[in-house]
Image (cartoon, helix red, strand yellow):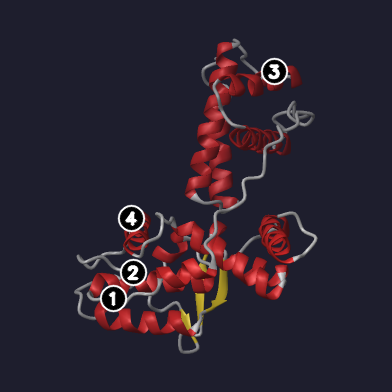
Amino acid sequence: MNNNSFILNDIKEYLVFVSQVKNLSDNTSRSYERDLKKLNSFLKDLNISNYSQINSETCSAWIGSLYSQNNNPRSIQRHLSSAKGFFRFLKKNNLIDSSPFDLVTSPKSSTNLPEVLSPEDVEQLLNFKPTNMIEIRDMAIVELMYSSGLRVSETVNININDFEENKSFLRVLGKGSKTRLVPMGRFAINAINDWLKERDKLQSDTDALFLNVKGTRLTVRSIQLRLKKMAVKQGLPPIHPHMLRHSFATHMLESSGDLRTIQELLGHSSLSTTQIYTKLDYQHLAKIYDQSHPRAKK
């Protein structure tokens, strides 16, 4: 079989599988596609024309080539995860007997802790009175994202009929098309009610909650730009939307210590993903200790 194509058809089948069967997001599918096409190019350069020619040494050499291209450990971990998932798919479908990636380990990477705002920063961010329709909408967006720990992609996809029990709860469509129910705080509810009054003034045939001035659904990029502008206006450094989600989780953990509940609220499928916030909480405790204990290092 031609070495230009022996793997490409299987990659296409795998991408259909992860998209339609596993219900992974479009972004994740595109990431897998990029990573596996890089692997295919590497195998092509080695004149490899069938799976039997690929062994663990080949796989390790590919990892080495990714290092030589200045990919960081986190990026290499993702490439390796993409390859391992693909070869598991091949094995499950009897296209190979065993995966050459089974014995290849991922590189260690330093833990990059999420950036979070302090409660005082959040208070400063939201300490303004909106003066026009756009600012009223922006206030509702920020209050909701911080109140319920939403991803920015989840926020733009909210529809006006997603609220339940007088807006006390919100149905959210998360990663992998999984739906979860999240509570909303009174500040978020009030801000959304204010925005809905303004939204009624726009002519729109969409049921999207957050609209632009043309009456169409707001985009992720628009929220990113508006939040950055809002933060700077309030005397803060530029803020990206995911900082609100990280801040929600961190502040909830500091107050409650209930990691399982936070996992559910964030929509994490694995508790290990949520546990990164315990490291932030430990940092917070250590800071308080250093500031407060008479025997702490000053």
On residue 225, the disc is 4
Closer to the N terminus: mark 4 or mark 3? 3
Cα separation, mark 2 vs mark 1, equals 9 Å
Q: Earlier in the sequence, mark 1 or mark 4?
A: 1
Label 3 amino acid? Thr
- Whether residues under marks 2 and 1 lie with C-beta atoms below 8 angstroms apart, the answer is yes
Q: Give, as a three-letter code, the residue at label 2.
A: Asp
Q: Amino acid at mark 4?
A: Leu
Of the two numbered discs 1 and 3 on the same chain, state the one appearing first in sequence: 3
Q: Could you tell which of marks 4 and 2 lies nearer the N-terminus? A: 2
Disc 1 designates what residue?
A: 130
Q: Residue at x 69, y 18 (%)?
A: 58
Quadrant in which the N terminus is drawn: top right
At numbered mark 4, what does the secondary structure look like: helix, strand or loop?
A: helix
Q: Tag 3 or tag 2, which sits nearer the N-term?
A: 3
Pick the residue in front: 177 or 297. 297
* Percent x, y of residue 243: 50, 58
Q: Residue furthest bottom?
A: 166
Mark 2 crowdedness (10 Å alpha carbons): few <14, some 14-19, many ≥20: many
* Residue 192 point in image, percent of width and height: 38, 80
Instruction: Identify the element where label 1 is drawn.
Output: loop
Label 2 – label 3 distance at C-alpha: 51 Å
